[in-house]
Image (spheres, helix red, strand yellow):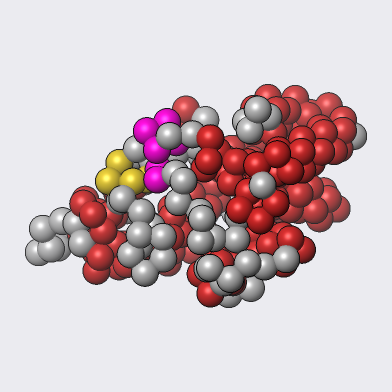
Amino acid sequence: MKNFEQFLLNHLPASKSIHPTYEEALQKMLVAGGKRFRPALLLGVVKAYNPLLVGGACHAAYAIELLHTYSLIHDDLPAMDNSPLRRGEPTLHVLFDEVTAILVGDALNTYSFEVLSNAPFSDYTRVALIRELATNGGLGGMVLGQAIDCYFENRPLGIDDVRVLHTNKTAKLIAASLKMGAIIIGDEKLADELYDFGIRLGLLFQIQDDILDVTQSSEVAGKLTNNDKAKNSFVTLIGLDEALREADELAEALTKEMDGFDEKLKNELLPLLVHYINRHK
């Protein structure tokens, strides 16, 4: 992932203008770091089957990170979570102002598709990647999940509806990251299989986030914790012990599923996924 981090730093969004802080704000949350989990999934799939394509695949991985970062910026806004901290840094609406944070989120969203449109692939592959990112990150995916999440604050949902919420808000972009890697190497069957696996992985990722929200300090997490009481989180609805049990069961099922991956894919993804699958423990 060092190569990806350097790629990101070499391709930071730039916009020279009379605005004194716009370009700095565009770059701030990107250079602040983050887990880079979604780019790592895409690049792991590509590296497993065609390492020669990894350089080009960095464009697609970067597009996912741009879209993900926009979603965090907007998620932290006063109208949503009103969070003061992200990736260990003050959030953009705190550091600059709310208008700047909204516009930077808008810019990173659209820039993600500009990056994909210029990626060094065939037109067919570029369109497929753009479609995948838009479908899972947009109106019927991540944005839908956020809409449900915000609308039902202080109105508890049933656990099945919470899974639908987080399938959209969190899991679909994780699943798309795996699928986009398979699209780049041209394996449609693998793309569908990895997408299904990614949905389950994304749900585990969200359950773990909900667990860590009540077990980690804000300093350790790098973002505001103990802030989900009004939200439809797994811990809020079923309690910490039951959430831990569900996370353990899902982690075990995903570990077994990974045993069925071919050796090349397993060698690339297993070190990454074992860390994340067990991060709630």
**Residue in the picture at 44% in, 44% down:** 225
> Is residue 135 visible to us here?
no
**Along the viewing direction, whichever of 226 and 22 lies nearer the viewer:** 226
Against 279, residue 238 (above or below) is below
**Along the viewing direction, whichever of 132 and 273 lies nearer the viewer:** 273
**Residue in the picture at 65% in, 52% down:** 234
Image side of residue 279 versus residue 161, left or right = left
* Magenta residues (range): 218-224
Against 223, residue 155 (above or below) is below
Residue 227 placement (x, y as % from top left): 45, 51
Image side of residue 100 versus residue 105, left or right = left
Please tell me whether residue 179 belongs to the stretch shown in magenta.
no
Instruction: Name the residue at the right extreme.
Output: 260
**Along the viewing direction, whichever of 45 and 204 lies nearer the viewer:** 204
Residue 171 image-quadrant placement: bottom right
**Residue in the picture at 24% in, 69% down:** 99
**Residue in the picture at 52% in, 68% down:** 153
User: On the rendered image, what quadrant is the C terminus found in?
Assistant: top right
**Along the viewing direction, whichever of 66 and 54 lies nearer the viewer:** 66
Residue 81 placement (x, y as % from top left): 41, 60
Against 185, residue 222 (above or below) is above
- How many labels were placed on the picture? 0
Residue 195 placement (x, y as % from top left): 76, 53
Residue 155 image-quadrant placement: bottom right
Against 84, residue 268 (above or below) is above
> Is residue 260 visible to us here?
yes
Residue 140 placement (x, y as % from top left): 64, 73
